Image (cartoon, rainbow, N blue to C red):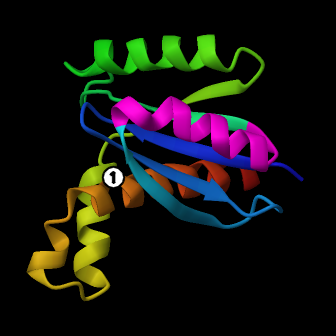
Amino acid sequence: MPRIIAIDYGQKRTGIAVTDELQIIASGLTTVPSEEVIAFLKTYFEKEDVLKVLIGEPLQMNGQPSESTPIIEAFVARFKAAFPDMKVERVDERFTSKMAFQTMIDSGLKKKQRQNKALIDEISATIMLRDYLTRKMI
């Protein structure tokens, strides 16, 4: 089966997570500078079979778009232009950064390691993907 990718796009860095081939396990793949994400994905899609891409949708607590929505929408437009045949699904990314930070604490990472924002972005993408897989199984 093809993989599913989750993207936590940010102005500076983009966290990327991927499923295994059975679409059961979500794992962090990498964090790349945001200006390089399309090039990174082109290379990845040449090597791996990908069914769809989940892209985080930043929402406020009341469900309204956040201030970063225009940045993400611009990325989604660039992504769709670069990969017109790829399925894209938007997923709620509220609380993923906070959950990622808590995951780092729970796993025993030292304070210096928890300041690694790239790791937070990768874990955030992994949480989005894991939540998606969980909802898909229900």
Is 74 left, or right, of 81 in this rendering? left
* Front in this rendered view, residue 135 or 81: 81
* Front in this rendered view, residue 94 or 100: 100
Q: What residue lies at 65% left-to-right and 25% top-to-bottom?
A: 88
* Front in this rendered view, residue 34 or 92: 34
Q: Measured along the vertical axis of the image, is residue 78 above or below residue 54?
A: above
Q: Quadrant of residue 34?
A: top left
* Front in this rendered view, residue 89 or 20: 20
Indicate whether residue 37 is drawn in magenta.
yes
- The residues colored magenta run 34-51
Q: Measured along the vertical axis of the image, is residue 56 above or below residue 125?
A: above
Q: Quadrant of residue 75?
A: top left
Q: What residue lies at 25% left-to-right and 30% top-to-bottom?
A: 11
Q: Give the percent coordinates (x, y) of residue 22.
A: 83, 62
For this orientation, the residue located farthest to the left is 111
Is 8 left, or right, of 130 in this rendering? left
Indicate whether residue 60 is drawn in magenta.
no
Residue holding disc 1: 121
Amino acid bearing label 1: Asp
Q: Measured along the vertical axis of the image, is residue 52 above or below residue 123?
A: above
Q: Is residue 92 visible?
A: no
User: How would you classify the magenta stretch by its main secondary structure?
Assistant: helix
Q: Give the percent coordinates (x, y) of residue 72.
A: 37, 21
For this orientation, the residue located farthest to the right is 1
Q: Check disc 1 and report its element: helix, strand or loop.
A: helix
Q: How many marks?
A: 1
Q: Give the percent coordinates (x, y) of residue 58.
A: 33, 29
